[in-house]
Image: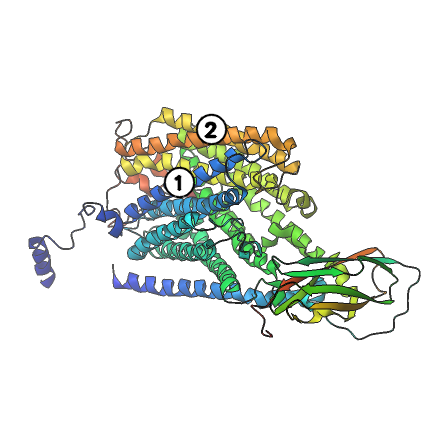
Amino acid sequence: MSTALSKKHTKLVRILVLVAIAMFGFGYALVPIYDVLCEWKWIERDRPNDIKQVSEAAYKVDMAREITVEFITTLNESTPMEFHPEIKQLKVHPGEYHTVNFYAENKANKVMVSRAIASFSPALTSSYFEKTQCFCFSEQTFQPKEIKIMPMRFVINPDLPASYKTITLSYTFFDNTEKSVNK
Amino acid sequence: MSAAVAEHDDHDDHHHDDHDHGPAKGLLRWIITTNHKDIGTLYLLFALAMFFVGGSMAMVIRAELFEPGLQFVDPAFFNSMTTMHALVMVFGAVMPAFVGLANWQIPLMIGAADMALPRMNNMSFWMLVAGVLLLASTLFMEGGAPNGGWTLYPPLVLQPITVGKALPFAIFSVHLLGISSIMGAINIIATILNMRAPAMRLMDMPLFVWTWLITAFLLIAVMPVFAGAVTMLLTDKFFHTSFFNAAGGGDPVLYEHIFWFFGHPEVYIMILPTFGVASTIIPVFARKPLFGYASMVWATASIAFLSFIVWAHHMFTVGMPIAGELYFMYATMIIAVPTGVKVFNWTATMWKGAMTFETPMLFSVAFVVLFTMGGFTGLMMAIAPADFQYHDTYFIVAHFHYTLVPASIFILMAAGYFWLPKWTGHMYNEKIGQLHFWLSAISVNILFFPQHFLGLAGMPRRIPDYAIQFADWNMISSIGGFIFGASQLLFLYIVIDTIKGGTGEKVSDEVWEDAAKHGLEWTLPSPVPYHTWITPPTTVPTEHVLDIH
């Protein structure tokens, strides 16, 4: 092979290898890009962990409307817990504050760190569902066999579009003991 | 003066730098070879072997689905079969087969003596073998092979119940396969860009070379992204990261985005070279230049570009803003335009041509018809609201099998029939070839067409058992599957028979009437000598580009 040709090969291969490495990096770059895009208002996508605590604002209660709020609980994989809401369904007026208690019990004989992740259906209602107090804001540490009654206080923003009549709020408890920094 | 002396010395010590030596003797030849024809053969034979391995897995699937209820395998093994069938067929059969064709044909078609980087070529083949063996080894592991689907979605594949010890092996296997195809792609780009005969401009290149050039860029762009995605799975499982773990702040939907950013270009990696081979075969048997050469090149490039910006049509049902659903819906539909240009051009090439229907042409014509059907079902699923019905049913199974089996696989068969006489110097048995075609073409429709009905009726994919209402069409589909599977043994027979001498008929250099007008490879002797184009050709066939120059 002539040296001129082999020089051409070397140059081209170097560029192509760099492209491949850059694309490997791009795969990882998609992680923060995804987070940023989900923050954009027009994307209108709820991220489970973006459900933030809000301070208690005084809304004008809209007595004309009634929204059904349903609560669902799930345990991820083999999380050794008992977990359920004290009431399964609630009819509320937008602007009205309510507190719902959730029962959680660590069935295992060891300390467990768990995290509840919320999910809304329809997803677009999540930004109108404001929580002033919730066990889902942070990880929960359970002593062996510990039972906790955990409150969640919320209000539905009266700006909620009229087409929504029912909101289903689902909580999944994840056993996060291994990955947690708080163990 | 000194040059003359050197020449004289060379003549005396005959043992060095002799370009006419043939292949090394013995089995070692195949392990250490750097000859593009040897490596092409290795790729093709390996792909053929994997085609039968992946095919056997499909037979297990169709046998289990022959009747409702669980008959032969347990559900976890069934799911391993669907997962492994896909991985083996995509990464072990279709992709390596096209790399094999590229190795054999690209240097012959562009007038180059070999691939640009022959030793890397050898390495990428053997890494492929290592990767596939690693993947196959998971079948014998505790907990069985991966069974969460070839897409390896979390949280499914991260749960201990769906994956025993197999996950890390499957992931390393994907890494090896990825590195192998990236090296192959780099080699192909370097060959095409740097080693064309001086007379061959880019717009003189045969369509097969063009489609492979574009495919190689797709490979370099997306295989590393897939490698990154599975690496994230690996660290989530074993190193306490939380890319896809909701409790740790991750999101499983993110994986779907990254995966399909790779996955959609990946489906074009399997279909673009298919287009290239079809565009090579059809003009020869229609005895006309390819219609719309330049538009074929631009259509290929447009499809490749569009493939990067439509990925989320694989996940309409996962939850996306309306703006996203609409964008991905319309962007996907645009792909029908360049694809339609291609189908139109193939049809126009055949229009008023002096057509004959030897086996390669039969497979190519069947490809044009059946691929178009697969394309149409793709358009149906591009309609976001309608996709909610089709998603994850047998409808999608029917769709992508129509674009892969009677498209990619048929064209690979056509390529085999088309070039085997050139490579071996022997003619294949045309009667058995035609029998193979008709059995395949009829049975493939019995196999996959009823799956459209099953999907529309609501039968989900990846299940070993199903409701009784789906029984009839499943049985028909399975019968088609068994006939199709058995027919492929004819192809195996023909390949072996042709290599060993075929019909005994001596083929001409052109093999097919006037083929030399269509490509440089047909101006070489048959069988093709071990070393070709030591000096590049001075003219290139221009018939296929007449209408643009």
Q: How dense is the environment of label 1, judged by Cα within 10 Å: few (below 14), some, or many (20 and up)?
A: some
Residue furthest to the left in view is B12
**In the image, is residue B463 above or below residue B178?**
above
Quarter of the view holding residue B49: top left
In the displayed structure, does residue B17 sit left or right of residue B507?
Answer: left
Q: Secondary structure at mark 1?
A: helix
Q: Chain of mark 2?
A: B
**In the image, is residue B332 above or below residue A159?**
above
Residue furthest to the right in view is A64
First in residue order: circle 2 vs circle 1: 2
Where does the N terminus of chain A fall, quadrant-wise? bottom left
What residue type is disc 1 on?
Glu
In the displayed structure, does residue B20 sit left or right of residue B453?
Answer: left
Residue beneath disc 1: B543
Indicate the colouring scheme: rainbow
Residue A47 in view of the camera: no
Quarter of the view holding residue A163: bottom right
Numbered disc total: 2
**In the image, is residue B369 above or below residue B109?**
above
Decide which of B25, A103 is in the foreground and name it.
A103
Where is residue A73? Give x, y as percent: 72, 58
Q: Secondary structure at mark 2?
A: helix
Decide which of B538, B105 is in the foreground and name it.
B105
In the displayed structure, does residue A44 sit left or right of residue B507?
Answer: right
Where does the C terminus of chain A fall, quadrant-wise? bottom right
Viewer-nearest of labels 2 and 1? 2
Residue furthest to the top in view is B431
In the displayed structure, does residue B484 sit left or right of residue A158?
Answer: left
Residue beneath disc 2: B483
**In the image, is residue B99 above or below residue A173?**
above
What residue is shown at x 43% (from left), y 55% (from top)?
B169
